[in-house]
Image (cartoon, helix red, strand yellow):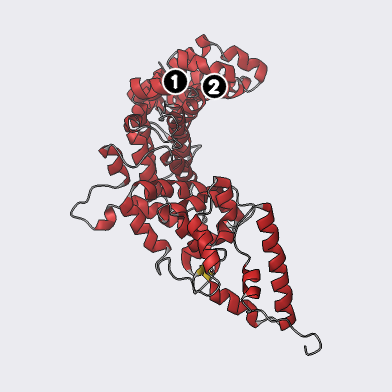
Amino acid sequence: MTLHTARATNLALTLLKTLGRQIDDTNELGTERAISGLLSLALDLKSQAEIDSKQADYAVDACNEALTCVANTMLLLPKCRPLFADIHGADTINKILQSGVTQTTAFLCGRCLFLSIESPKSAEYCVDSLDLPKTLAQTIRGFLDRESDKSDRFSPQQVMNELFKAAMSLCVYYPRDTPQGSSDDALSPEHAVKLLDILQVSLDTLFALPLANGHLADPARQAIGIALNFPTLSPDPILHCWLPPKSSGAESERYRYVDRIYHLFATLAATSDESYKAEITPLALVLVRLVTEQPDVRQRLFYRVYPQNTEDYSALPEDRPGLSGTLVRLMRIPEGGMVSGAIGDFLLALLGQDVSKFILAVGYGNAAGYMLARGIAIPDSVIRQVRESVDSNLVDPVTGRYLNQDMDRELANMTDEEKEREAERLFVLFERLNKTGFIKVDNPVRTAMESGRFQEIDEESS
């Protein structure tokens, strides 16, 4: 191919790209012959650029225009996406990526893969026949520390984001083989190993990329979403991705990914901006899996959330210092949606799935919405505690604080008349609850009155 030919090809493909943006003209490009021809041309141009440096720029630009035509056609004409799989278009994209690419070429390859991987069959072919996870991981890693080329259309982070979207498609569509009745939608260990390279580069990206203006960088958002698809227990290659084997280095090296995910979670949770909710949820869910499946991780994070341990009931849960109070405040937000549930799952996992400890640590008043949504019943032990707590220094499961402190604080600011009205209100409330069957406990007000602890106030002397 001569310099003149490379330049002419580039101009012709640029014109074709412009015409292909019209939906009527896209039909002409949405055929098996057209897509196959454009992909073959892109690969030939990429190879030619490596051989002849004089026409490299024109050849690379022409390659990018051919890939843009394919991507635009699949975007505007979704019915042609199966054709890409039928002609094994992923083979061509895989070869282009393996040969070393510019930022724009890598971005367009990622876009083509993302649009074309939309079925278990296509994902299976890319993983089992092409080992595409390895190619994607190597390409992403190449852009992780690369300085941005300002002459290119796309930044390294934009390229990584697009490649991660293709990787996510592989994780989503690759067969799961989840055991029947299992609530865990993670990949099976056998299948997760085949996508191991994607998990590793996702964790490395989370570890390496700093927050961008207080938010997760776009590639980091994709990376944490991908990590959600993987188990943490087995086999050993998967376990060692999450928790690298101990070496001669510091113990913190083993937990570097766990600590990084926790740090991102704690930092974002501490902000009051509503826009952070979508970023907190996947971080919390990844931590839930780690805490549930790895006892040492649970112990490590427990003392970070509760450095004073869970038995400090002198303050209301939402008023306690540090992350524990912050998480309770987030969990009780009525419109919290998924983030409230994810935080509830995290705290419950952190407390060993012990519902009684969870209620005492969070307060039933704060946890009621979460427990209702998850179908979690109040344990009998907590109900018994309500019955027995009239004269004891037990924790009020509703507020999560010592019962006598709540009573003393409220009673100290009430007149005798207000105390009497409050007692009458509580009496009526407990009677209604007992009649409806919502809760079956002895009415503490009736018990107190029968025992002589309440005294009728003489209105004339008040």
Residue that carries the numbered disc 2 in the rendered image: 69
Q: Above or below — where is 85 with respect to 155?
A: above
Q: Above or below — where is 100 with respect to 373?
A: above
Residue that carries the numbered disc 1 in the rendered image: 122
Mark earlier in primary sequence (1, 2): 2
Instruction: Tell me the quarter of the image containing the C terminus.
Output: bottom right
Q: Nearer the viewer, residue 79 or 244?
A: 244
Residue 196, given in percent of the width and then of the height, sits at 33, 35
Q: Above or below — where is 23 with respect to 432?
A: above
State the SS at label 1.
helix
Q: Nearer the viewer, residue 312 or 169?
A: 312
Residue located 46% across and 31% down the image: 172
The three-letter code of the residue at mark 2 reads Cys
State the SS at label 2.
helix
**Residue 438 as seen in the image, left or right of residue 321:** right
**Residue 146 visible, this orientation:** no
Q: Residue furthest bottom?
A: 461
